[in-house]
Image: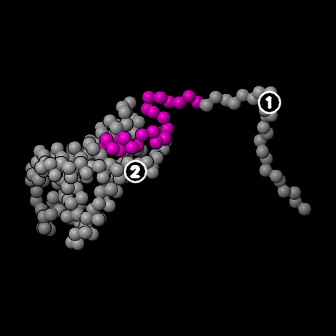
Amino acid sequence: MVRVLAFRKAVLAGVAGAIAMEAALLILSRAGVPTVDIVGELASVGFDHHSLALASATVAHLAIGVVWAIFYGYFCWARLKWPPPLQGLAFAAIPALLAILVVFPQLELMRHHAATVTIDVAALMAPLSTLTIAGLVIGHAVFGLVVGTIYQKPVGYPADHKPARPARRRLDGHEKQRRPETSPTRSRP
């Protein structure tokens, strides 16, 4: 089966989802919940110049949101008979798990200024407190809800309803039967 992707809608959903996620994490942080500043974390491994690091980290976070939204639109949209925001919420479990188990620990590991590091799973997961994990889950849930809300009815048909095949055109007495057009042939001199 070939799936069609509404690319512009996926890009819009990814950018909006990443912005909403960052806003939700900022609100949680201002409320005193120890969450992850995703742009700040990405900037800390980027450049030495602070404003360049923040700009590049912001672009990177938006681009990652777009990639996840494209992935959602192509592989996951309309696979479940759920409302689109709930489909997005369920989908958000994938990037949330990857952020918790791979991305955040790797960002922390990149701060070790050593040629080689011997580390075990407990030490790798040590920076992840329960509240940090909760913040990442909430942020990704917001991302999924926004992506699912925006990426509705992009193309095609709902998962639970395949459209009927088009009916054959019937010719009535007022229409002429069309002849297939032929290309004019050249006569050779």
Type of the residue with mark 1: His
Left or right: where does residue 132 sit relative to residue 158?
A: left
Note whether 12 is above or below 113 in the view shown: above
Residue 82 appears in the picture as rendered: yes
- Name the element at disc 2: helix
Q: Residue 73 carries which label?
A: none
Alpha-carbon neighbours of circle 1 within 10 Å: few (<14), some, or many (≥20)? few
Residue at the spot of label 2: 12
User: Earlier along the polypeptide chain: callout 1 or callout 2?
Assistant: 2
Give the residue drawn at x 24%, y 58%. 39
Left or right: where does residue 123 sit relative to residue 23?
A: left
The prevailing secondary structure element of the residues shown in magenta is: loop
- Name the element at disc 1: loop
Q: Residue 174 carries which label?
A: 1
| Residue 140 percent location from the top left of the image | 26, 45
Give the residue drawn at x 34%, y 57%. 63
Residue 19 or 156: which is nearer the viewer?
19
- Are the two marked residues, 1 and 2, in contact with CB atoms closer than 8 angstroms? no
Q: Per the image, is 175 magenta?
A: no
Q: Magenta residues? A: 144-165
Type of the residue with mark 2: Leu
| Residue 53 percent location from the top left of the image | 25, 67
Quadrant of the rendered image containing residue 118: bottom left
Note whether 57 is above or below 137 in the view shown: below
Give the residue drawn at x 12%, y 49%. 32
